[in-house]
Amino acid sequence: MSQPHRTPATGRIDRSVPVTFTFDGRTLQGFAGDTLASALLANGIHLVGRSFKYHRPRGILTAGSEEPNALVGVAKSAAAAAAGQSVPNLRATQVEIHEGMVVVSQNRWPSLAFDICAVNDRLAPIFVAGFYYKTFMWPKSFWNSVYEPFIRSAAGLGKAPTAPDPDRYANRYAHCDVLVAGGGPAGLAAALAAARAGGRVIIADEQGEFGGSLLHETGATVDSKPATDWVASAVAELAGNARVTILPRTTVFGYFNQNFVALAERVTDHLAAPDPSLPRERLWQVRARQVVIATGAIERPLVFPENDRPGVMMAEAARIYAGRFGVLPGEEIVVATACDSAWVAALDIAEAGGKVAAIIDMRPDPGAALVARAREAGIRIETDCVVTGVLGKKRVKGVLIGRRKASGVVAAGEISCDCLLMSGGWTPNVSLHSQARGKLDWQPEKGAFLPGDPVQAQRSAGSCRGVDGLAAVLADGAAAGAQAVEAATGTPAPVPDFPATGGEAGSGWWLGTVPHDRNAARVRAFVDFQNDVTAKDVKLAVREGMHSIEHIKRYTTTGMATDQGRLSNMNALSIASSALDNQIPQVGLTTFRQPYTPVTFGTLAATSRGDLFDPVRRTPIHPWAAEKGAAFEDVALWKRAWYFPGPGEDMHKAVERECRIVRESVGIFDATTLGKIEVVGPDAAEFLERIYTNPWKKLGVGRLRYGLMLNEAGFIIDDGVVGRLAEDRFHVTTTTGGAPRVLALMEDYLQTEWPDLEVWLTSTTEQWAVVAVQGPKAREAIAPLVDDIDLSTDAMPHMSVREGHVMGGIPCRLFRMSFTGEAGYEINVPPSRARQVWEAVFANVERLGGCPYGTETMHVLRAEKGYIIVGQETDGTVTPDDVGMSWAIGKKKPDFVGKRSLARPDLVAEGRKQMVGLLTKDATTLLEEGAQVTVEAEPARRTPALGHVTSSYVSPAAGRPIALAMIANGRARMGETLHVPMPGGAIAVEVVSPVFVDPEGNRLNV
Amino acid sequence: MLLIHCPCCGVDRPEIEFRHGGEAHIARPADPSALDDHQWADFLYMRSNPKGVTAERWRHVHGCGRFFNALRDTVSDRFLAVYRTGEPRPDLDAASTGMEGGK
C-alpha cells in the first residue's frame, strides 16, 4: 500500500487523506487530490493499457484530457462493477480517484501483462494503413460475417457496460455576456477583467481545480503572491460575485452557430458517495454574447522509434506530476527535447527530488542560462543529439542516443533509465477557434497554426494564440476579458494588471520525424498513439496516392482518436508535407470537430430516455381500454387500442370476432386520435375549395363530405371527413398522424398565398373526444342517450352532422358516417365527459351483443370496403385516379392545390399503378404486405415488378384472406392471374375489385 | 443552434422554435392552368440553392405561428435580414439589420 514514487513533500495532494482503489483487482492507495494517473504513477505503474490495433503495451503519456493511451474502465464501487455498471474509455489523467473506485485496464486478454492479441504487433507489416481495404476485400460476403466481427473483437477500446445506465443526467440552458473556456492564467485573468466590469460571466475548466499551469508553476508569483495563492484569491473573488458562474470539471466541447456553446459538466464522478439528488453529468447549452477561448497549448511528442513504450512521457506531464501531484515518474529520468520548456521540467523534477540522468537536446546550442542551471543540478547534457530508440517493452530500460552530423545521425551509445521525457515544443490549442469556423494562420517562425480572424463573437487569449511567458499570458487574458465584456455590454472596461514573475517564455520546436540511424524498415515511430498510426503509415498513404490531408487522415486514421489529433496532427502534417514535397500551409490542417473530448450519450440525452424519450398521447378512453386488457399500438405519438383479446384469444381470433360482431350487431371504437381542425370565417368554404380536391361551396349546412388533399405535385397527402356546421364554419378531420402537417400546410397557404381570405384555423384535436359506434345496431345503441337530435334516416341521413346534447346536457357534435361500410355514428364530446359517454354507450352496445374493437379490426373492415389508408395504399406518388377516387375531384373547380399537376404527362400516362384487390388462388394463403407482384411465377432477372401488396388481412366477411395492391394498369387486369414471388415459392393471385363487401353500399343506409 | 429574429414577435429565439419553409419569393401562379408543363415543373421543383445569400421562408411555429422571410448567407449561416411575408426582398447594401452573436 506504500506509494514509493512520491516526492518528499511537493504537490497539492492531501497526504493526510489516503484513498484506496483497485486497478485490475490490485488494491492501491493514493491521496485525495490525485488523478488516477498520478496515483498509479505513485505506485510505480506505467503499463496501463494495450493499444488499439497492435495491442502494444502502453503507459501514461500526458497529464490531461488529450491522453491517448491510459484509457480505463471505471466503476464507482465493487458492487457497481458486479452489477455491470461501469464507464469505459475514461482517460486516467482526468479521472479523480475516490474511495472504493474499481478500475480495469482495457483491450487485453487474458491480462494486461500477457495479452494474446499482442501477436498483432508481430503481424504489423500486414496491418499497415488501409489494410482493411486491401486485405479483407474478397470474398465480398465475408465482410459482414467473418472479417468485421473478428476485427471488431480483436481491435477496440473498452467494453460497454452490460447493465442499463443507472445514473441521472441533467440539462441546463444559460445566457451570459462572456463565456471563458479554460481556467488557466489567461482564462482567470479574462474572467476577472470581465467580472470586475460588471459582466455576467461563465468560466469553465475541464479539470477539478482552476489554475491550469499555475498549479505546477511552483516558482512563479502573480500580484506578488505565490501563483497558487493568486489562483485561490482569483477563484474566491469570482465565487463571491453573483454574476459569475464557476464550472470546474466542465469541458467546453462544442462551439456552434451564433455563439451557442455546449459544455459537459461532470458533477459526481469524483465523489465516492454523491448526493443522490445530483445528476452524474450536466449538459450546459450557453448562448454567450462573447466567448474568450483560453485553452492553452499542448506539448507535442517527438516521433522517434519506440516512442510509445511505457515510461515514455511528455516532459510537461512529468513536471505536472512532480509539482502538482508529488509523484516522480521514474528513478532514472532522461529528457529528450527540442525546446526550452523541457529543460525547465527537468530542473523542476530534479528540485522535487527526482534524478535526471541526462538531457538530450536536438539543438546544437540551447540557451546558456538553462545549460548552466542543468550543469549545476548535475545533469548530463547532450546537445545536437537525438534519441534513436528505446530499450524495454513493458517499461523503458534505456535509450539509444545518436549524434547529428551533416552526413546523418551517428550512434552515440545508450543511457539506461526507466523514464524518458520528451518534448517537441508546443501546439497552440486552436480546436474551439476552428470549431467556431475561424481560419488558422501558419506562423513559420513558431512552427504553429495560430487563430486567424474570428468569424463569430470570440477571441483567443494566452498560449492558445501563441502568447508565451506567464506575464504576457496574464496580460493577454486580461485584455481579452476586458474587450469581450465591453463588446458584450457596451460599457468601457478597464484592463486589470496582473504583474508576474517566473514562467518565462522559452524557444525551440521540432515537427515531424526525428532523424535516426536505425533500419527504417524495422522500426516504428508513432504519430497517433491511440490509433496506432506510425510515421511509415503516413508516408505509405502518400505513396499510395492520398494527396489531400483529409484523405491521409481517413486512410491512416491519424488524428481520428479521442484527442482529435491534438497530439498528433502537427507531426502527421509535417510528415505528409515532406512526403508530398509541399509546404505545411499548402497541405493544410484537417478540420477540428465537436466534441472536443468524448461526451457521454447520457449527457446528450439528459432526461430524454424511457417514458420521456418521446411524448406519448393518450385518449380519455385509454384507461378504460387498458382495464379491459386491450393491446395497444403506436400511431404517431398516440397509443391506440389495437384489439381487445377475450379469454384465450390471440390477436387473430380477437380481430375475427370483433369484425364479425361489428357487421352483425354493433361495435364501439375510440376515434379520438383523428386530427381535427376548426375552419371558420366568411371565406372558409372558398378556402376548403382551394385546399381539397372536392367541391365545398354547395355542401349544405349539416352535411358531411369526404375530403381528399393533394400536394402541389398532385399526390395524395391526407384525407378525412369534413362537416359543415354553419355557412362559415367547418369541422375538418384529418388522419391521426397527419394533423400537424395538414394544419401547417393550411396555414402556409392562408398566410403566404391567400392572405386576402378571411379564414381562421384552430386545432381542436384535443377539444373533442370521439366515440365511434358502427354496425347495424348503431342507432339502437346510441338513441337512448341522445337528448335533442332526431336520428331517423330521413332526418339524419348517412353523411350528415348535428349539434346537440347527449346524456342530459353534454354538448356533442354527432356525425353520421362510416369507415366500416356499416351504418355508424361518431359522437364528438368534450374530453372531460368522454369516459362517461363511452361507458354509457358501451353498456348499450354490450346489451345489444356488441363489443369494443381496436385499430386492427378498423383496418380489416375498411379494407373489406376498399377504403384507402393514406400512407398505406399511398406513398407520396399516388394520385386520386390511381386509387380509383376521381369521383372526389370537383370537375368544375378552376383550381385547387395539385390540380395543375394532375394534367402533367406522367400523371395521365398509361401504365400507372392502380389500386385493385387481390385474392389468393388457394383462398387460404395470407399475402405479405409489401410483397412484389409479377406476371410470371418465376420472372427472369431484372424483370420489373408490376406493383406491390399494400394491405393484406384475413377477412371474416369474405371468409378468406383479401389484399389490396397497387398494380400497373391494374383496373384493366380484372380476372387476370398474377404472382407474388416469395422465398417459399410464388403465390398465384387473381386481380379483383378492391371492394369485397357490399359494393352497392346498401348497409350504410339502414 | 441558430438564433433567429422573429419580425412579428420582435425577439431573438432559438432555431428549435422555428421551421424552415424553403426558398422565398416563389409565388404560386394565379392561374396554374395557363402554364405549360415545363413552366409548371419549374414552379414545382426548380430552386436556386445559391452559395451565398439566399432568401428563405421561416415559420415561428412554436411562437406566433407566422411565416416570415429571411436573408441568410449559406456559407457563414449568418442571418442578414428578416422581413415579413409579402414585403420585397431587402436591398442588402441598404439593410443594416444583420444579427451578430454579440450585441
Image: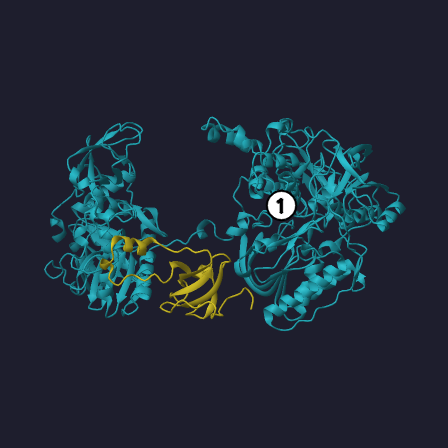
**In terms of depth relative to the viewer, which is nearer, A729 or A541?**
A541
Residue under the point 17% across and 43% down:
A995
Residue A153 lies, in percent from the top left, at 55, 32
**How many numbered discs sit on the rendered protein?**
1
Q: Residues within 10 Å of mark 1 (few under 14, many from 20)?
A: many
- Quarter of the picture containing the N terminus of chain A is top right
In the rendered image, which residue does mark 1 sit on? A563
Q: Quadrant of residue A116?
A: top right
Q: Is residue A341 left or right of residue A723?
A: right
Residue A78 lies, in percent from the top left, at 63, 41
Q: Is residue B59 left or right of residue A126?
A: left
Q: Is residue A598 above or below residue A413?
A: below
Q: Which chain is cyan?
A: A
- Give the colour scheme shown: by chain
In the orientation shown, which residue stands out farthest toward the left?
A794
Q: Is residue A184 left or right of residue A781?
A: right
- Residue A334 visible? The answer is yes
Q: Amino acid at mark 1?
A: Asp
- Element class at badge 1: loop
Residue under the point 28% across and 70% down:
A756
Residue A956 lies, in percent from the top left, at 20, 39
Q: Is residue A743 left or right of residue A772?
A: right
Residue A868 lies, in percent from the top left, at 23, 47
Task: Please give the chain letter of the residue carrying mark 1.
Answer: A
Chain B shade in the render: yellow
Q: Is residue A395 above or below residue A230?
A: above
Q: Quadrant of residue A831?
A: bottom left
**In terms of depth relative to the viewer, which is nearer, A921 or A841?**
A921
- Residue A331 visible? The answer is no
